[in-house]
Amino acid sequence: MPLPDTMQALVQLHDGYSGTQEGPSIDTLEPYLEAREVPVPQPQADQVVIKVDLAAVNPSDLHFIKGEYGQPRIKDAPAGFEGVGTVVAGDSPLVGQRVSFFATESGTWAEYAMTKSQGLIPCRPDLRAEDAAGQIVNPLTAMAMFDIVRESGAKSFVLNAAGSQLGKLLIGLGRDNGIAPIAVVRRAEQADLLRELGAAEVLVTSDDDMMAKAEPVLKSLKPRILLDAVGDQTTADLFFAMPNRARWVNYGKLSTTPPKLTQMGQLIFQHKVIEGFWLTCWMQETDPAKLGSVIEEVQERFVSGKWKTDVAAIVPLSEAMENLPAATKIPDGKVFIKP
Ligand SMILES: NC(=O)c1ccc[n+]([C@@H]2O[C@H](COP(=O)([O-])OP(=O)(O)OC[C@H]3O[C@@H](n4cnc5c(N)ncnc54)[C@H](OP(=O)(O)O)[C@@H]3O)[C@@H](O)[C@H]2O)c1
């Protein structure tokens, strides 16, 4: 079927970086995006056009549209990194098939998106649309970072923002692999659910005596890896309270107030390490055969019920300018955009 000439999309109003550090929260989209009718992208060699069925809204999308992410914005290009849809045009044997994808050429907050032919992930028919739309960013990051945990040889690990979608995926991996998750959250009401999912311990950063509660837990469970999406003072305090050879793996910037590093000597005398993780680099560096088996496991975990995407809201594309900001404030679930 021929593609239409134009489509609805949420397009970016700015190029490049903003220089701000406000974090991934939005009260309005108007400073960053505009709903517009734009030309449907035309695929060149090694590119495909996908009719978007459902697009994810991740913290990275919000960092990106605000000009605070690790790559520059492109004015007039549709936003949205991740989604699921049907390949409708381009250079691929997957034309006509449902795929999860990361949009490298034209974003997913639109009726049609464009990406490279190589990065497409065919979806099992029994994979729910919400799981398929968020199949790359969080699940692959969880799998990749859990390998770091496994390789540490420790019987436990620490993760913060543990009530996030990614946190819940990591807790499920810990539970199923016998490596005890020590979950750190800022709201006590998340504790019971995280324990049910498999957290061995839950530490609440709003407790006045949180570090006093953390110290015996760290001493008895001896975690080596701290998976950190927050990057605040509590994270630094936890890291410095962890055993020798602890690794602080920062993968998110949810806090807007950076920590003070109070005990740098531990990097020298206790062999502790501070490092970063970015899925984009991991995907470029990972052997395609390994990537294929990770993706198979991801789909199996969702279909078998070991993992679940909690859905806060599905916002129609036509209402996103008005309703998306409020939807992103609903706790404990992901937001999606439906073209
Ligand atoms: N580096 C990478 O390659 C990579 C890949 C994927 C994801 N990520 C990062 O992973 C993190 C989680 O993503 P997600 O999609 O799973 O998130 P999500 O489901 O949208 O949840 C966001 C979570 O962040 C918590 N949060 C927000 N601000 C916070 C703060 N200042 N201090 C502590 N907690 C805070 C929220 O806690 P409340 O419920 O209390 O509001 C909520 O649990 C994000 O930072 C994202 O950028 C990084």
Image: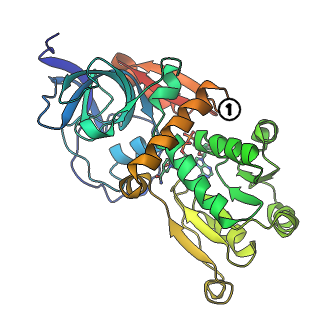
Q: Secondary structure at mark 1?
A: loop
The location of residue 29, given as percent across then percent down, is: 36, 34
- On the question of residue 199 being in view, the answer is yes
Badge 1 density bin: few <14, some 14–19, many ≥20, Cα 10 Å: some
Residue 176: image x %, image y %? 73, 43
Q: Name the image quarter holding residue 316.
A: top left
Is any atom of residue 163 visible in this view?
no
The residue at 33%/28% (across/down) is 109
Residue wearing tag 1? 306
Three-letter code for the amino acid on which mark 1 is drawn: Lys
Residue shown at 25% from the left, 36% from the top: 117
Q: Residue at x 76, y 40 (%)?
A: 194
Res. 133 image quadrant: top left
Quarter occupied by the N terminus = top left
- In the visual, does 42 lie left or right of 308? left
Q: Is residue 183 left or right of residue 145?
A: right
- Dividing the image into 4 quarters, which one contains the C terminus? top left
